[in-house]
Image (spheres, rainbow, N blue to C red):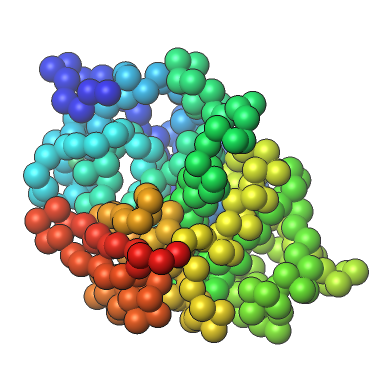
Amino acid sequence: MRLCTTHVGVRRIWTVELRPQQGGPVLVCPHCLPPPHPLTAGSARSAVLAHLAQHARRDALPSHLRTCQCHERGCRWHPRHRGCSGSVLLVLTRAQGGRLWRLADACTACAAVTAQAAVVPDALLPAAVSPRKTPRQPHSPTGSRRPGGDERVRVKEMLTYLAAALPRFCSPSARLLALQCALRADVQGHIRLPYGFLRGMRLASHAAPWNELKHAGWLHCTGRQHGCMQAQLLDAAVLTQAPGREQRARAAHWALHPIPLTTPRETLPSVQLAALAVAVHTEADSGRVGVEDLARLCATAPPPLEDLLDQLTLTRTLAFWRQDLEAGEIRWQLPEHP
Ligand SMILES: [Zn+2]
Ligand SMILES: [Zn+2]
Ligand SMILES: [Zn+2]
């Protein structure tokens, strides 16, 4: 992969505008005809993501030809940093209070310092996987991989996506619930979560997380039936996930007990979400990740993030954590016993 080329590479930036109008906002794309109907405010966000993802899928490019589009435009999308580095990612950015949305190729360093940006995982753009890449593992024997490895990647991708897709008012409980819904939905986006399962998540008697996701236009509750809470996902981007249902269900299960970072049962949802965000970045018995990236996954800002990490240390979920100011990273180590 090349970050800095002498010539400008293929342009890989797609933008849409949500133009407010009576009856709901209208999605305006410079490449497409205007849609016939206005969007409802709630569904606007997922419609934007689905639309931009569709352009990225259509304009798929082999990964070795993808360059940091931010760099090619003089890095004006973010405050100064030490230069481009890391892999080229698809990054979604919202601007002007959610009116303008941009999906673009950017390097890891630029993505990390761009405000209101989140990485869109490859799993949400199945057709964009370049034919040169080895196919994702659907046929490889399960025994050949580190147990939990695939689940961890799947959860990391979905958590990253949800950090971008859900509005910032969504609480940690709502985010944990959204993760389960996204990973457990069938191909039509239908979800059935048994009450026993919700009790296990300590959500059985709480309507608030469901309401938050409803107000976000992310799902629509279709009722309670046969001991299950039923809902319909409205986020079109989640429905195009590449991995099959069985793989996603395994990932959903892992997310409830992200071994080896399992928290005590009575842990607060904010600390649970932090444990999960740390778990997806843990290799063997230690891990590291950019401060801003981790804060985004935990739906918080860097100062409260430190309190959450302290909580994980107090409960001996982590042996210790520290901030590497030079690298702008948080690093941690797990306790010796599992
Ligand atoms: Zn378009
Ligand atoms: Zn840049
Ligand atoms: Zn860059």
The C terminus lies in quadrant: bottom left
Q: Quadrant of residue 73?
A: top left
One can see residue 47 in this view: no
Image vertical order of residue 185 relative to residue 102, above or below: below
Name the residue: 75% across, 65% down. Answer: 193
Q: Residue furthest right?
A: 226
Image side of residue 99 versus residue 241, left or right: left
Q: Position of residue 223 (x, y in %)?
A: 82, 70
One can see residue 101 in this view: yes
Image side of residue 310 versus residue 61, left or right: left
Image vertical order of residue 291 relative to residue 2, above or below: below
Q: Position of residue 52 (x, y in %)?
A: 48, 38
Q: Position of residue 231 (x, y in %)?
A: 75, 62
Q: Quadrant of ligand 2?
A: top left
Image side of residue 254 versus residue 293, left or right: right
Name the residue: 38% across, 38% down. Answer: 90
Name the residue: 17% across, 37% down. Answer: 84
Q: Position of residue 265 (x, y in %)?
A: 56, 79
Image vertical order of residue 58 relative to residue 180, above or below: above
